Image (cartoon, rainbow, N blue to C red):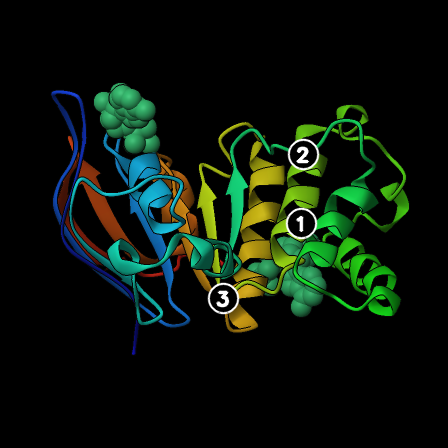
Amino acid sequence: SMLIQMFHVYKRYGAKNALVDINLEVADSEFLFISGPSGAGKSTLLRLLYMGEAATRGQIIIDGQNLSRIPRRRIPFLRRKFGIIFQDYKLIPTRTAYENIALVAEAVGTRRSLVKKKVSSLLRTVGMADRARALPPSLSGGEQQRIAVARAMAGNPKIIIADEPTGSLDAESAAEIMGLLRHYHRLGATVIVATHDTELIRSMGGRVVLLKGGHLEISTVIPRLSS
Ligand code: ADP
Ligand code: ADP
């Protein structure tokens, strides 16, 4: 079944057409890359999905909910379906790695007695158990992104959205982050990764849609090369 459907979606900023007549369907439990050069509209497309902003025209349906018809008070509940990962991590610099993850676990209503267990388990999953007390600025970029991935998973979201998640990382850290996203995908989540890095896509394989100048040009499946 289709988890995400976009029908004739447009996004304009003043006179600029950032997205033009986008038609896209994403199945439940799919791993999808959105590729294309800088300025193609990748971030804009992702922002429309997690309701960072509204489409100018067209319909977006997520998990059966039409975003143009959703009452304002329901938006926080829809947002909980998403875990979002950014190129620049966006961790709270004055909170420890543990607290950054715990805040999300608490926000989605994880029972108090379970938060510690849950955060510890996530820290282990991303290989950061020994840095729980570290503040983000004391961590490397790769380590910060691993915390950001754990934070994204802390709300058990159905959908992970990652906007150039490896754009600031060296190749080794990038591969680790992609491995973690694949791990979460295998657990049943839908994962959408925007990246201009065609090498990264080739190394992972999977379904790829290409954006160019706001137009969705092609959709292909690239076989996974390595494992
Ligand atoms: P990508 O993520 O592929 O680099 P973006 O989605 O960031 O592309 O941008 C697509 C186009 O929309 C670009 O021309 C960009 O300058 C423009 N754009 C994006 N956000 C805004 C905004 N808030 N205001 C004006 N123009 C924007
Ligand atoms: P794959 O086995 O899919 O090729 P990778 O070897 O690329 O995955 O994994 C990269 C990282 O993802 C690992 O270092 C590990 O931290 C994490 N990871 C992958 N699978 C699991 C798992 N089953 N449980 C916990 N962490 C995992």
Place residue 10 in its image quadrant: top left
User: Position of 142 compared to 73: left or right?
Assistant: right
Residue 155 spot, x, y in % from top left: 63, 60
Q: Earlier in the sequence, mark 1 or mark 2?
A: 2
* Residue type highlighted by circle 3: Lys
209 vs 35: above or below: below
- Name the residue: 40% across, 49% down: 50
* Residue type highlighted by circle 2: Leu
Residue 173 spot, x, y in % from top left: 62, 39
Disc 1 target residue: 151
Quarter of the rendered structure image containing ligand 2: bottom right
Residue 96 spot, x, y in % from top left: 83, 37
Contact flag, marks 1 and 2 (Cβ < 8 Å): yes
Contact flag, marks 2 and 3 (Cβ < 8 Å): no
Disc 3 target residue: 158
- Name the residue: 80% across, 57% down: 119
Q: Earlier in the sequence, mark 2 or mark 3?
A: 2
186 vs 178: above or below: below
125 vs 201: above or below: below
Can residue 76 be seen here? yes
- Secondary structure under tag 1 reads helix
- Secondary structure under tag 3 reads loop
| Circle 1 Cα neighbour tier, 10 Å, few/some/many (<14 / 14–19 / ≥20) | many
| Circle 2 Cα neighbour tier, 10 Å, few/some/many (<14 / 14–19 / ≥20) | many
- Name the residue: 67% across, 58% down: 154
**Of all residues shown, which one is farthest toward the bottom?**
1
User: Position of 114 compared to 197: left or right?
Assistant: right
Give me the disc on residue 91. 2
Place residue 109 in its image quadrant: bottom right
Place residue 47 in its image quadrant: top left
